[in-house]
Amino acid sequence: MSEDTRNEVPVRLVRRPLVTESAVGTPPPAPAASGETVNITIDGRSVEAKAGQWIIDAADEAGVYIPRFCYHPRMKPVGMCRMCLVEVEGPRGPTLMPACYNPVADGMTIHTKSDKAVKAQEGVLEFLLVNHPLDCPVCDKGGECPLQDQTLAYGPGESRFVEEKRHWEKPIPISDLVYLDRERCIQCGRCVRFADEVAGDPFIDFAERGDRTEVAIFAGQPYGSNFSGNVVQICPVGALTAKPYRFKARPWDLQQVESTCTTCAVGCRSAVQASSNEVTRLIGVDSDPVNWGWLCDKGRFAFPAAAGSTRLSVPLVREGNELVEATWGAALARAAEGLARARRSGGIGVIGGARLPNEDAYVWSKTARMVFGTDSVDAQLGDGVPAETILGLPRATIDEAARAALVITVAPDIKEELPVLYLRLRHAVREQGTQLVELTPAPTGLTPYAAETAFYRPGELAALAAAVASSEPVTGDVAGVAGATIEAVRAHVARAAEVGSPSGPPVVVVLGRPSLAESEAQVAAAAHVLAGLPGVKFLSALRRGNIHGALDFGLSPGVLPGRVGLDAGREWFEYQWGAPLPAERGFDTAAMLNESSRGRMGALVLVGADPLTDFPDSNLALRGLLGARFVVAVDTHLNASVRHADVVLPASAWAERRGTFTNVEGRITWLSQLVVEHSVSWPDWMIASELAERMGVNLAFTCLEDIWAEIERVSPLHHGVHYELLSGIRARDGVVVPADAATIAQTVTSRPLDPMADPGIASAELHRIAPSALLVTSVEMTPEPDSIDPSDHVAYPEPPPSGASGEGVPAVPRPLGAPPVPAPSGAAPLAQGLRLVTRRTMWDGGTQVQAAAQLAGLAPDPAVRVNPAVLAEMGTAEGEMVVLRSSRGKLTVPAAADASLPAGTAVLTWNLPGGSAGDLVDSAAVATTVTIEAHGGGS
Amino acid sequence: MPVTDAPKIVTRRLRQDRSWTLESYLADGGYQGLRKALTMTPQEIHDSVNTANILGRGGAGFEAGRKWGMLRQESPVYLTINGDESEPATFKDHALIEGDPHQLIEGALICAYVIGAAQIFLYVRGEFPLALERLQAALNDAYGYGAVGHRIFGSDFSVDIVVHPGAGAYICGEETALLESLEGKRGYPRIKPPFFPAVMGLYGAPTIVNNVETVSNLPWVLLNGGDSFAALGDGRSKGTKLLALAGHVKRPGNYELEWAKVTFRDLIFDPRLGGGIRDDNNLKAIIPGGVSSPWIGPEHLDVSLSNEAIAGIGSMAGSGSVIPMDHTTCTVRAAWRIVRFFHRESCGQCTPCREGGGWLEKVLERIEAGRGREADLDLLMDICDNISPGVAWPPAQTTICVLGPSMPPSVAAGLRMFKDEYLAHVREGRCPFPPDRLPRRLARV
Amino acid sequence: MPRLNPDNLQRALDLIALYPQPRSALIPILHILQEQDGYLSEDGMNHVGELVGLEAVEVRGTASFYDMFHFEPVGRYLIAVCTNIACMLQGAYRLLEHAEERLGVAPGGTTADGMFTLEDAECLALCGNAPCLTVNWRFFGDVDPEGFDALTDDLRNGRLDDEVPPHGTLIRVRRSVGLAAAGPTDEATPQSAEVGADVDAGPAPHRSTGPAVELSTHRTTTATNVVDAAHLEGRQ
Ligand SMILES: Cc1cc2nc3c(=O)[nH]c(=O)nc-3n(C[C@H](O)[C@H](O)[C@H](O)COP(=O)(O)O)c2cc1C
Ligand code: SF4
Ligand code: FES
């Protein structure tokens, strides 16, 4: 396979979509598609269809395309636009019916091209153009517009409409990101249905009636949804446009690749488009197990950050108090020299790595152990969950969670941090009968859908989880949660065990960090007891980019690539790498910062890490950086922590490099390169290799393929997961590791992109210049017989019998098992005051948001939310300033009342410009407590 | 003479003083039908209603008893009375609600007893505040009298009634749009399948929707028996029918007449009824069953006003509104006004209805204003054809509900019956009818 | 800007209790809001949304489907002239034209003194008395240009104040009973327990306060000629 074809995801050139998945979220009247098949006749051809399937889907599968506008395969049909009318034979002769709203029945005879059907289709198209402004030359959608395309294919040729058209004020902003041009709207309702049905943010609706119908927002209440970009994507005309993309490019100028969004850890598939070597747009691609075509707004709109003003473009070295530009050679030499010194005295700590693709994470993991001689590597910044907990517990996929009878969340606000996972869970609750139970200290975006929400007192999560998992009678409150609530949660657990799941575990725990002001040990302890629930599996809610890749490749203390413990893997990896591994488990980020703050670390290497903004305890982070003797930062942007570095090495950003990505499920998908690297930045693996080289070790990696070949050889988790598998036709849905032989050998059928579901992708594809797409046109990929020996590819191959063939070859190590029992968290009494809860929101002070000019202003102003009773007691009105004090510091912010909060809890959003909870959090405490007082009052 | 012999069933009390009060109703034997019903089994009443063969009076003409029999067997069941009457020139339910609200309440209660309804909603057009006031007052009194609510008249039967006002949208008369509206939503007709609210109606529960006049017949049927009702009328069209006569007649108004026993000629010309065309002008055309029905010419004057007979001449009886138009009528203008109505009232879901209506209106407006082209005549027919393929009656449709297909009949009938008049508009470059009757907005252009 | 006042809030809550689902009470509550302010204010719609569990844009989106709701203040008297077929055949457009000239506004417009808003309406179901119009939805039939002038004079001079309530008032009779059905249908109307004081849980008789005002009837043309059951069997 040539370099070119590996570079890109193969996409078959399609004019007409063949959606192989049946409609999701069918409306009540249609019988749910069962496994049964029925025989129908479409245009004289007899075909099989799934019982209960919509005619339009059955036709798609049979290769018969029926034009459409309002129908979207991921939403309930409404049958409004009337574009999909076909003739169906019935007792009273053939009748016109919308194909999107009528299920197939055995023996049904359907005509999609009869005179009457064609006349109806032409008629509808002519009607649609009656009030359409036909301003295609200046419309963003021109060239990729379903209305244009279907008019060409199914329209009447010319319009007979000579009257005056309807007029409306040209585009009006309906949010900071989306414009609405009502003249172009064809009232298909996709946007308002998406907002309500899919996202649960019904902030747009139809107003007025008849041909005055318009999409509208309420005065002064913009369409502030975390998912607003999707309505732009699915609008079949140019009525909704995205501010960042308006007038940026014409579709036929675009180059496109398919890739994975790395903004959070869900790993949504997307089509990435560029014009003149600049990324211009992202469109969600329908990956059935993951994102169903949706993207969140941060993932969709944050890409301009890569070209933002703080983007690093050249290496920097410290001269006195200043960072000055340097050549790569000089900077690498400085770094290598400093690190070599540090290796000898004090040791090196590596913080970060969640930004890196898998290959780069592997190389950094190896470099740290082999070259830096340290196990102090941590991709989590004290804001996650212990790696052993995430890696050691049985893992669930998103689909398994969505099909489980019960989902328990021990997590932050998923709607803000893993937004598309929120969409999937919300759908599961609303359409698939999944019950949701939340164990959370404060309300989240999922709370409205939860069957039960147990608001616990921060710092007491473990006690609550123990009460939930136990069968002892509940007496009184636990962790601030009423006994009755705990009983109710237990009842849900019992019911789940009873009803089970059609496939997969009956209970899935979505596990993350409910609050950054509560210790991760609480989460670990809670996970430990919940792991005792019958048949339970865990879905990680760690949020940061490729954190799961980083963990899988050993960027965590005590964990080696392939989810192998340091000691368990020692022999194998020393054999494979030909170098001794660190003798002892290293420090995690908190410990590294602690050590460093006392001047005891030789060097800190920040690999895409900004502890000053991301480590929960800002005070400790600052002391740690100030106390470090030598700091090397490898990053894309000049963030707050990078400013403290002695050497800054610029790294390539997403879309500038290739690689693979691992999502919350352990699903590996392909990251494509689309634009040429920014300035002189390098991919992270190359930077590690060069550092190693200068420190005397030649890692011998010349390209990603070399790296992956080694990964496949040494990482038991990745055995058999060939690169061809990931970059080939599989790429869209990827492969969940560990993958068994059957999964690996599975024949995958391509699902061409549906230009009517997500316009813009296929049309651009038709015109794009990127050659790779034109090369690969295969529909199926069956692995070449001799390249795959199924016995090679069982996950975690059995170790060869001792003493047998492989003399001197150590046994393949086993993966991490159940996590260690957490030490009983000290019942150290917490200080008096409110217990602090802090967690992230989509638009915050983080680099991804702040470096993108259009997004920076979206971050809300900070405010502390407390129960109104708290304010009443203080005599403070909403909006007035209050002072929060903790053992770490103080913060003055406005107060907001929130009656849904427990009285003893204060909620402060993490990292907003103008005030971060990090100034208050004490990472050593089980939970941070704060006192609150009116500003300027007395003290 | 049949015109007067038959008893008045639903309008019997309308001329009485303060007919809408409980005292007046009780004085006329009010609520006796309900009392009798409560001594019978629901099945017995249902049988009797089947015998009576009460066709739905809301326009579709579906047998009430048969509809009740189609209920999906699941509780709760709801009963919704359709009092949204907004069909142009139909004003019979308006009179019934205002004039005899207790009769409506009693009828609804009888129906609720038969179908086992958990709750009754009386959906009344919002622009009828007087009707709403009288109905609400009557309901309050009926509760006080023990006819509604808990253990009605001491029986085991309990049901609540809610008077629900609409807010001005013709489409909410369509039964599924009515249910959406009653759920507090935009009045979008629901797409079929499911085909009947009896299967999936209000809140997804099985629901009966009946017209005001339909259920207003029930007290009488209970007291006099289904047979007596079926003895009136002919064929499928049994009992009496309340006909709303408007337009160019001397005596417009509501007339309750034995069904199928009167012809258009009787209704329009009988001195006790329409009394003839105003100013003794010539009759030009009749809109026989509401403005969605195809027009008929004077040659059909002797057709009986029954459902079947009107269907036999390619039109429909609809909700029972009859509009004669005299020879001074500009049929382009009449078609324009009817299309304008449907265009304004289209809910906007279906492309053909939403856009086709506006287009038809604009073309007709242009022709009426003297700016038409001959090609517009074919264009009009083709737009009609794209809304209602074949432009036949009963209509085929490219739309969800029949509001869209209600536009073509007036246009098609006009073009068929009065093509020369259309051509005259085009050729003369103006409307050939007296300008003083020209809608001002057209005259200006 | 006004939200529902306490009295109207209570009425709204009472209405919500009548329906199996709160959203069903949306339109009746909006009528109350319009009665309070003469139109639907933004704050009011926000408030109603909170009550029935909708976003304000959904309240507005639903309300704007219906012609009776106004989103800007209208004149003290909303005069809706029917121009649909039956009235048109009887000269409704002449009447409308006269009204436009007399009031100096086009349909949709409001007179400078805020007294009248004119509307070109669809069929009002008073076709037996065509041409007809409504003033704040109170009916006037057989209206000729002279009658129109007399009517507007009467309105201006307050002579019809008893019969034509202020704009927004839909119905002057309050529901005086809550849900009462129990026993067999109890389960189907679980909210009956929540109606509180308005509910008679037991088999006791039900209170009735009767009509709040003496109800007016239809009028033809002027304030002097009351015609009862006006559209039954022909004009005299
Ligand atoms: C556009 C449209 C408007 C309608 N308007 C009314 C109406 O105002 N009143 C009514 O009773 N039925 C109306 N109907 C008929 C109803 O859908 C339904 O058939 C009727 O209420 C059933 O009651 P019935 O069986 O007692 O006639 C309308 C139907 C359509 C399609
Ligand atoms: S035909 Fe017209 S009124 Fe009926 S559903 Fe379609 S758009 Fe609405
Ligand atoms: S009606 Fe079927 S796609 Fe719109």
Image (cartoon, coloured by chain):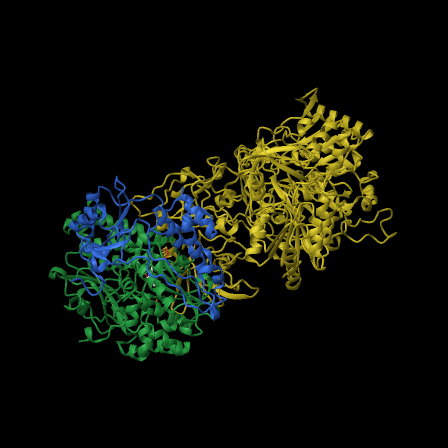
Chain colours: A yellow, B green, C blue
Q: What is the quadrant of the N terminus of chain C in the image?
A: top left
Extreme residue in the right direction: A803
Inspect this view and state whether residue B55 appears.
yes
Is residue A681 positioned above or below A752 on the image? above
Inspect this view and state whether residue B331 appears.
no
Q: Nearer the viewer, residue C75 or B351?
A: C75
Is residue A260 positioned above or below C125 on the image? above
Query: Where residue A889 sits in the image (x, y, percent)?
Result: 67, 32
Is residue A606 positioned above or below A425 on the image? above
* Figure quadrant, ligand 3: bottom left
Query: Where residue C36 sits in the image (x, y, percent)?
Result: 36, 48
Extreme residue in the top direction: A320
Query: Where residue A720 sits in the image (x, y, percent)?
Result: 72, 50
Residue B375 is left or right of residue A437, and the answer is left
Which image quadrant is residue A33 in?
bottom right
Residue B126 is left or right of residue A651, and the answer is left
Query: Where residue C53 sits in the image (x, y, percent)?
Result: 48, 51
Residue A830 is left or right of residue C236, and the answer is right
Q: Nearer the viewer, residue A325 or A454?
A: A454
How many dots with numbers?
A: 0
Q: What is the quadrant of the C terminus of chain C in the image?
A: bottom left
Residue A876 is left or right of residue A705, and the answer is left
